[in-house]
């Protein structure tokens, strides 16, 4: 699979990263533009904390793991400076969005802003050696844990007690985040948290009879027959599975690896659109109409996370079904999402795989899923296939 | 146009209303089911206040205006009983949703719940002659006015002061609501409010150079170059235009009528999908990618409100362009949305006009837009065309 490794590396450094270095830096007001049209034109100047934090992480991670390029460190510091100045309220909670100048637009109702800020500052603290960044990452992380019982705080519209549901997203992100900033948090905190999260995902959210992890379950783990309880997001499932694979590799747990591989294959089989190809965005476990009108659309992140998942599954087990799925996904994504002409990838396709929004970045798409996936697959296939690859190689 | 009048009347009474009388009544717990599959099967039992209030209104309105059918009054009372018992919090604010049994699920963050509750109870007070219903409608209406500066209250996530925008939806609904419950509010209140709203819609939200009304504008009425500021919802525009037409007819203002007709024609020209037919759901005034992923979908309410708008425009002016648009819309909607086999109309089509969600009702679609539009068009075309039709006939 070394040919894929080279392809994904070249795509990262020749077609994707240059797009962000060229177009996303706001020289005048600081931070990054993420609302970029097909050709890199800035069509909106709002700054969304998810994407600001993620871009800091992306450039710091490359600096840490690939090469000590001053340009990458500068890019990460550029975003960090803006976030330090404008990103948090008085209690250290991260806003959801700011205007171009850094004035708050949307309150800190969304805890994933904090997750990606912690991830960015954690990676940058290692890259820059600056203790203040580590402190921000640590404080933010503990703030997340403190808020995790009711992450939305006053903005939570759910009436308490009638149908309290547990959500899949936070444990999933925490599993990845804690791994990314292990240096900042300390090994023991991370190990304990990860054990708990593996349990949560596989024993609580994953439903054996359905063969999928649900987005929301009742407090006792049972299925809630409601819009929120019935919804499945196959891309979210597959992303979670490769986060868990990294944990399984770290603890050298081959049984867990095999279990995750089987689950991942089931999810792909379920989520794949047999008529037009690609993976559905949302599905209802009972086949009822989902409330998400965009349910049948094909999203970039869903597909690139599926690629990463299958690459890791194959690399770890040599399972031929994983290889076949990887190749099928590779063909679909490169043919439909990739933009050879202007760089980077499209984000949103309709069910038929036609471009739905002519953009490279927006409110939710930034410098993150595509370059991270390219990096992961480059690394995973950079080594010969080995069913007993040591942990350190795969979870790179 | 008498043939259309008959068609729309028959469709209302033979194909649409029976669907709701047969399938939506929850005999066990009260209120209405609105999550109904293609064949009328209940696929979810949550009760959404928008739709509960609207269904009370629909059956009361038919009782008031068409025939004193006990069955219709019973249906309205059935919903009202459930809402009276469960619908409000201690401050009289209407919840967004309840579970089947009536326990609150989602807090009263959404003021349109209150709008449709007021509309329902207002119409039912007239139908039933019960003063308590009138009182609820009046109290709720004054509550709406009191909350109108910050309708979402604590759930409002917008940071104050950075980009305060005025929204189009509330003045629009109020223009229709006040007319519907004029009996409860008194003539003077309604007239003053309507004058203010005509001004708001046509002088503040409507932008002459763009030829459209925006969903959100800056406090001084200027355009905000942001996702919220750039978005246009053609269906919302057209619905607003026929609300304004009713007001213009009432005040016998022919100049205003002509102005609204011209604006409506511009909106349709702008919102029509020249490639696949139908009206887009969301557009960006500068042609940038909108943030709504469902932007290119074809929604039932958009199309039936457009039909009502063109029917009234034609009836009031005899303008041939309006007739052509009515016929074009008629053909599109009846071919794509109507379900001859199982009754009622589909709600959500993809850009190509294919059914996207195989449902007749859901979280947002209930017994409202389709039957109201059928009723309106039946009434409008029930009279011979007359460019000077008296107000009382058209605004029926």
Image: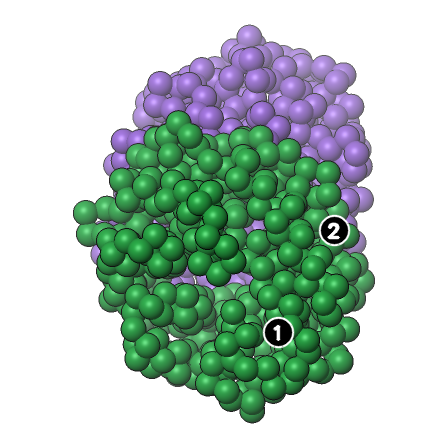
Chain colours: A green, B purple
Q: How many marks?
A: 2
Please say if B261 is above or below A128. Answer: above
- Residue under circle 1? A312
Write down the chain letter for disc 1: A
Whole-percent x, y for residue A333 in the image: 72, 56
Please say if B41 is above or below A54. Answer: below
Neighbour class for label 1 at 10 Å: few (<14), some, many (≥20)? many
- Residue under circle 2? A336
Q: Residue at x 28, y 44 (%)?
A: A84
Q: Residue at x 66, y 69 (%)?
A: A381
* Visible residue check, residue B249: yes
Of pointers 1 and 2, the one earlier in the residue sequence: 1
Whole-percent x, y for residue A365 in the image: 54, 48
Please say if B122 is above or below A273. Answer: above
Q: Are marks 1 and 2 in contact (CB under 8 Å)?
A: no
**Residue extending furthest toward the left:** A90
Secondary structure at badge 2 equals helix
Q: Residue at x 42, y 47 (%)?
A: A73
Neighbour class for label 2 at 10 Å: few (<14), some, many (≥20)? many
Q: Are marks 1 and 2 on the same chain?
A: yes
Q: Observer-nearest residue: A104 or B83?
A: A104
Whole-percent x, y for residue A22 in the image: 55, 35
Whole-percent x, y for residue A234 in the image: 61, 68
**Residue extending furthest toward the top:** B255
Q: Is residue A130 left or right of residue A329?
A: left
């Amino acid at each position: 699979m070394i040919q894929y490794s080279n392809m994904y590396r070249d795509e990262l450094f020749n077609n994707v990263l240059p797009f962000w270095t060229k177009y996303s830096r706001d020289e005048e007001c600081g931070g990054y533009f993420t609302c970029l049209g097909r050709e890199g034109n800035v069509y909106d100047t709002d700054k969304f904390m998810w994407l600001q934090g993620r871009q800091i992480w992306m450039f710091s991670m490359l600096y840490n793991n690939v090469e000590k390029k001053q340009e990458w460190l500068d890019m990460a510091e550029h975003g960090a400076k803006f976030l330090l100045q404008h990103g948090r309220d008085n209690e250290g909670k991260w806003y959801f969005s700011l205007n171009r100048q850094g004035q708050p637009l949307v309150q800190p109702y969304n805890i994933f802003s904090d997750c990606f800020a912690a991830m960015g500052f954690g990676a940058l603290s290692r890259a820059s050696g600056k203790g203040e960044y580590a402190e921000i990452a640590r404080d933010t992380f503990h703030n997340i844990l403190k808020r995790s019982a009711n992450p939305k705080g006053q903005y939570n519209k759910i009436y308490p007690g009638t149908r309290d549901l547990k959500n899949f997203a936070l444990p999933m992100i925490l599993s990845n985040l804690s791994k990314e900033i292990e240096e900042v948090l300390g090994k023991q905190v991370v190990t304990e948290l990860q054990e708990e999260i593996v349990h949560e995902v596989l024993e609580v959210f994953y439903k054996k009879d359905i063969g999928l992890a649900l987005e929301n379950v009742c407090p006792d783990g049972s299925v809630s027959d409601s819009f929120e309880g019935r919804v499945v997001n196959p891309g979210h499932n597959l992303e979670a599975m490769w986060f868990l694979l990294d944990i399984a590799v770290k603890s050298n747990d081959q049984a867990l690896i095999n279990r995750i591989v089987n689950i991942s294959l089931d999810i792909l089989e379920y989520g794949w659109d047999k008529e037009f190809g690609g993976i559905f965005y949302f599905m209802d476990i009972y086949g009822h109409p989902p409330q998400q009108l965009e349910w049948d659309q094909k999203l970039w992140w869903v597909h690139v996370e599926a690629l990463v998942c299958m690459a890791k599954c194959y690399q770890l087990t040599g399972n031929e079904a994983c290889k076949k799925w990887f190749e099928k996904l590779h063909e679909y994504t490169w043919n439909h999402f990739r933009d050879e002409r202007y760089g980077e990838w499209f984000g949103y396709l309709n069910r038929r795989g036609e471009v739905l929004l002519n953009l490279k970045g927006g409110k939710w798409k930034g410098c993150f899923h595509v370059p991270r996936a390219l990096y992961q697959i480059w690394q995973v296939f950079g080594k010969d296939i080995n069913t007993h690859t040591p942990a350190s190689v795969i979870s790179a």
